[in-house]
Amino acid sequence: MIYGTRLTQAREFCLLTQRALADEIGISQGTLSNAERDLTELPFSVLTQFATTTGFPVDFFQQAPRVTFEGLPTHFRARAGMSVKESNQAKRGGEIVAEAAVTMLDHLEGPALTLASMPLGTDPEIAAKGARDALGLSPHEPAIGLPVLLEHAGVLVVALPLPNTRRDAFSLWLQDRLVLALLDVDAGDRQLWSTAHELGHGLLHRGAGASKTLEQEADEFAMHFLTPLDAMRREMPAHPTIQDFALLKRRWGVSIAALIRTARRLERIDEQRYTSLFKQMAARGERLRERAAIAPIKPRGFRAMAETLYGPHPAQGLARSANWTPAFAEDVLSRHATGSELPSRRITNVVSISSLRARRA
């Protein structure tokens, strides 16, 4: 049996329209549409062509899907101009990778979710303080390594093999599991802010659709979570320069632009200085690529689960379990940290996933 949802997943993940893919494999768009809606079944020869074109094994389409994001409110943090086609690609990739993670969790015991969603309208500053407390972060401690800290708190964090996109991250609730998907970003400060922003959506906006107001609340949450104002009052100089902001960026992991906005909020700079600092950055070409570059941090949990179940080189075992190609499995695994790639002793000790263990039969 062929599952139409699988056909749609593979097609949209590859950014193919029904017409383009139907033309490629020699069938009508109507036939493909009916197959995706489970109204007809593709002949095996056509399915083989579909598999070759999309890069997924035939067995992938014959396995009932366990995870679908359809109908679930999904919040994206993305650059301007993200198309529906691109958001669908990210969601289909999230479904595919999250399903593999959920399947592995059937055989493992890991951290329980210690972060709870809050009623709509909760003050983002209060929510941010509560989240920091739940994660064991002191009021003056940076949240470096946030993707891994969230995994320790029971959030399912997956990294998707989608390079060079205009999307940074998205989040949603899958039943009682908070899922946060990270896409390839080359700037660690942007990744950290996107992760905190999506955490804000997860805690503040469960079940709510997207809106400009909710985006503003998620950014407010990220600001209070990543740069608590009491800590910034202690550490930010009275008349900060770009170099001062660069030093603070190294410590707190957030962008210089975000720190300038915080300085204005704290009245360490006036409106004229605020404008001047951004003009300086623009003149030096630093609005899009700031100084004091910070590397992104990979989540660890997905790879740790695969290593626990399939050994230190888990691509083949993961591919067999998920009905992926070994190359796709390796691509997904490469987005998740090995033990040696974790950035600090604190994070290594907290989230080596040593708490994961095989369930007893």
Image (cartoon, rainbow, N blue to C red):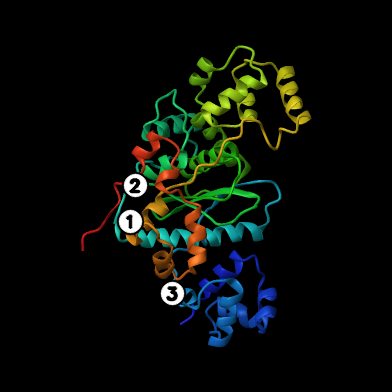
Left or right: 332 as drawn, with respect to 138: right
Percent position (x, y) of residue 157?
45, 49
- In this view, 218 is above or below 105: above
Percent position (x, y) of residue 179?
45, 51
Q: Is residue 322 visible?
A: yes
Percent position (x, y) of residue 296?
54, 41
Q: Do tag 1 and tag 2 residues touch (Cβ < 8 Å)?
A: yes
Which amino acid type is marked by label 1?
Thr
Return the disc, 2 or 3, that comes first in the chain's sequence: 3
Label 1 element class: helix
Q: Which residue, given by chain and number where applicable, does mark 1 sit on? A: 308
Label 3 element class: loop
Q: Which residue, given by chain and number where applicable, does mark 2 sit on? A: 353
Which amino acid type is marked by label 2?
Ile
Q: Do tag 2 and tag 3 residues touch (Cβ < 8 Å)?
A: no
Observer-side mark, 1 or 3, equals 1
- Furthest residue toward right: 283
Q: Residues within 10 Å of mark 2 (few under 14, many from 20)?
A: many
Left or right: 297 as drawn, with respect to 241: left
- In this view, 150 is above or below 20: above
Which amino acid type is marked by label 3?
Gln
Q: Determine the CA span between mark 1 and mark 3.
A: 24 Å
Left or right: 46 as drawn, with respect to 314: right
Q: Determine the CA span between mark 2 and mark 3.
A: 29 Å
Q: Is residue 153 visible?
A: no
Q: Which residue, given by chain and number where applicable, does mark 3 sit on? A: 63
Q: Residues within 10 Å of mark 3 (few under 14, many from 20)?
A: some
Question: Residue at 51% of width from left, 65% of height from top?
Answer: 327
In the picture, the quarter occupied by the C terminus is bottom left
Question: Residue at 45% of width from left, 69% of height from top?
Answer: 65
Observer-side mark, 2 or 3, equals 2
